[in-house]
Amino acid sequence: MTKIYRVSIIIIAIISSILIMFSDAKKPDNLILLPLLFALLIIIVPSFTKYMFKNIGITIVNISMLIRYIITPTLISIYGVDLNRGQILLTSVQNKAVYLMMYEMIVIFILYAIFYKNFYTDNIVKKAKEIKSSSNIFGWLFVLLCIAILISNPAILSRYSFVWTASELKSKVVEGVSVSFFLTVIQLGHLVLTVNLLNMIHKFYEKKNRFVYVVISIIVVMISASFMVGTSRFSIILPLVTGLFTILKLYRPYAKVIGLLSFVVSFVFIIVSTALKQSTISGETGTSSNSSIFEGLNSDLQIYFSGVSNVAHSLNTRFIYEPFDFMAILSDLTRSVMYVNSWFGTHISALNQFNVTFYGGGTSQDQILPMIGQGYLYFGFILAPILTGVTIIMVMYLDKIIQKSSSVFNVYIITYLCLKFALYNMANATILLSFMTNFFLILLFIVWLNKLIKVR
């Protein structure tokens, strides 16, 4: 399977390079270097794809890099680098953005080549531990706490849309709920309820090995992932992939069937959620209706996967943001970390300044500063990939932890965290740190309490 993937990468990269070479669209002069370098590095470092399809983290990293370095440049060669929103970019800035992306790509492959033997093994199936259901008293108590919060603050449910019946997406902002902590707890409770049900179903499977429990588990994950927060497709895709991968780990005898079903289910979810979001956003902004599906895709992929345009806007932000202001950096990184964000006072934010540059002013703050752009603004060109480098090492470490996990709860929450890091192209260090503190530590605390009461 990995050999087919490598050959496919090379073929697609060649096709992409030819299209870029003969393209008349407005694009960076050096855009062709992105697909060529990615294909070359895949050949030079074959271990980068060797452990795909067995480890969720490195699999998602590979797929997101394929989108970023080959699919997106191909679309740019047809439709150009400019988006259907934001400021027009100079070609010189676009060229520099491509070089920065190439630099980041090289650093990722070098770090992987140095450290991968510490995290991955050829005997992954033999060394993986058997996953068993376990006592989860505090998980259910946490769900009861969430129910109590919902009873006292029912307006929280207004931020969720059920993708199968909704005609439009709801706002993420909840009127009448002044405590954002409650919103975070309910979102976390959504995950805990899912893993509680998977744990309970697997307990029945351990007594009677029947395929019906696999089907029930998939249904649970599908229903759980059908609730979208605001307009974020990330809020359904991430729980969906996490749940399906957990099921794959729990029911290994049915791996092939689960793999096929997971592909079909994921594809359907992406199509339905994308269509729902486009109809909603089109009605609000009127931008998508005037462009073709693929032209809109070109814009979306550059925005969501740190494409040339987004990185170029990061470079432009340097004109209004000074690097190496460590108090400002700490303030920026912890701005979404509850309570800690008050320690560092008010400083100029790279995240806000990026949005000012992106839109040319105004109040809009909906664009995510790319991680490589964040590193560039904080530390300059040479140290720009430092945040990405830490993230890739975390992905490899979490892949290893998943293989060593022996409980349903551990597999689920570590997989969820691993996916957040693996999709670094769709986030930045501030978002990841926020999840680590506001979400993941609470989940770990529940795990610790369950282990404590089990020992006693």
Image (cartoon, helix red, strand yellow):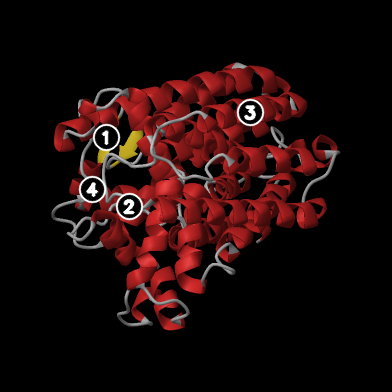
Residue hosting label 2: 367
- Where does the image place residue 135, in percent across and percent down from the top left? 59, 46
Residue 245 location in percent, x, y? 60, 34
Label 3 crowd (10 A; few <14 / some 14-19 / many >=20): some
Q: Label 1, label 4: how many angstroms apart (C-alpha)?
A: 11 Å
- Camera-side mark, 4 or 2: 2
Element class at badge 1: strand
Residue for point 83% across, 42% down: 127
Task: Name the residue carrying label 1.
Answer: 161
Q: Give the distance between the C-alpha atoms of the residues marked 2 and 3, in whole angstroms.
A: 32 Å
Does residue 251 appear anywhere in the picture?
no
Marks 2 and 4: in contact by CB < 8 Å?
A: no
Q: Which quadrant, please, contains the N terminus?
A: top right
Height in image: 339 above or below 10? Answer: below
- Disc 2 residue crowd, few under 14, some 14–19, many 20+, Cα 10 Å: some
Which residue is painted at 48% across and 52% down in the image? Answer: 95
- N-term mark: 2 or 3: 3
The residue to which callout 3 is attached is: 14
C-alpha span from label 4 to label 2: 24 Å
Residue type beneath disc 2: Gln
> Mark 3: which amino acid?
Ile
Q: Are circles 2 and 1 on residues that touch, CB within 8 Å?
A: no
Query: Element under label 4?
Result: helix
Of the residues tagged 2 and 3, which is closer to the observer? 3
Number of residues whose C-alpha sits closer than 10 Å to that of mark 4, classed few (under 14), some (14–19) or many (20 or more): many
Residue 193 versus residue 372 in the image, above or below: above
Q: Amino acid at mark 1?
A: Ser
Residue for badge 4 = 156
